[in-house]
Image: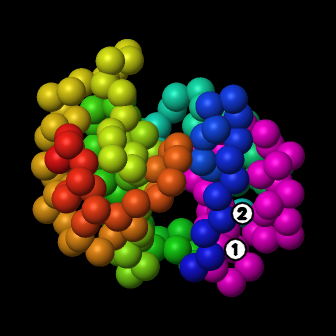
Amino acid sequence: MKIEKVIVGDLEENCYIISKENSCLIIDPGAEFEKIKETINKRKVVGVLLTHHHFDHVGALKEILDFYQTQFYDFNTLKEKEYTIDPFTFEVIYNPGHTKDSISFYFKKEKLMFVGDFIFLNSIGRCDLEGGSFKEMQESIEKIKALKDDITLYPGHGSKTTLEYEKRSNSFF
């Protein structure tokens, strides 16, 4: 699976384009539709995955849906279980704390997870915004700590990290 990070918008949000064969999923299209479209090129968009609904993660969503005639998947449409959107298979993990609707997409076979604003390199998402809860964030952290260390985490802002590194170095863990 190929992973491309497109940094978009004033808050430098990470929009990810993940590809297999000639199909791709878009994760968190925060802004700059034309920049995202250019990265996608001629691949077939089979869906859009949203980690949560803050403006910097959904700013280009309407343009993406209209242009590619695809659908989006989020907390309101997904349960905590495994899904296949050909040719991609992933698990949904609820992780409230930053927002009530925060979820992560875990591609178990590939050992990678798209975590939105749940976890950052050496940090976590803010819990002081509307819908945030530090107590729920702590519960979400405990839940993810039960997973294997060898998972690469792709956050909504900044650099990727690993679960092993965060367990060892992140003061919130």
Residue 140 location (% of width, % of height): 20, 44
Q: Give the range drawn in magenta.
A: 16-44
Give whichever of 60, 11 is nearer the camera.
11
Describe the element under mark 2 as helix, strand or loop.
strand
Label 2: which residue? 45
Q: Residue at x 28, y 43 (%)?
A: 95
Tell whether position 27 is magenta.
Answer: yes
Residue 17 location (% of width, % of height): 65, 61
Q: Does residue 131 lie above or below 94 as drawn?
A: above
The amino acid pointed to by label 1 is Ser
Q: How crowded is mark 2: few (under 14 residues within 10 Å), some or many (20 or more)?
A: many
Q: Does residue 162 lie above or below 69 as drawn?
A: below
Asked if residue 93 can be seen in this view, the reply is yes
Give whichever of 91, 114 is nearer the camera.
114
Q: In which quarter of the image is residue 135?
A: top left
> Residue placed farthest to the front in the image?
169
Residue 128 location (% of width, % of height): 32, 18
Q: Do the residues labelled 1 and 2 touch (CB within 8 Å)?
A: yes
Tell whether position 86 is magenta.
Answer: no
Describe the element under mark 1 as helix, strand or loop.
strand
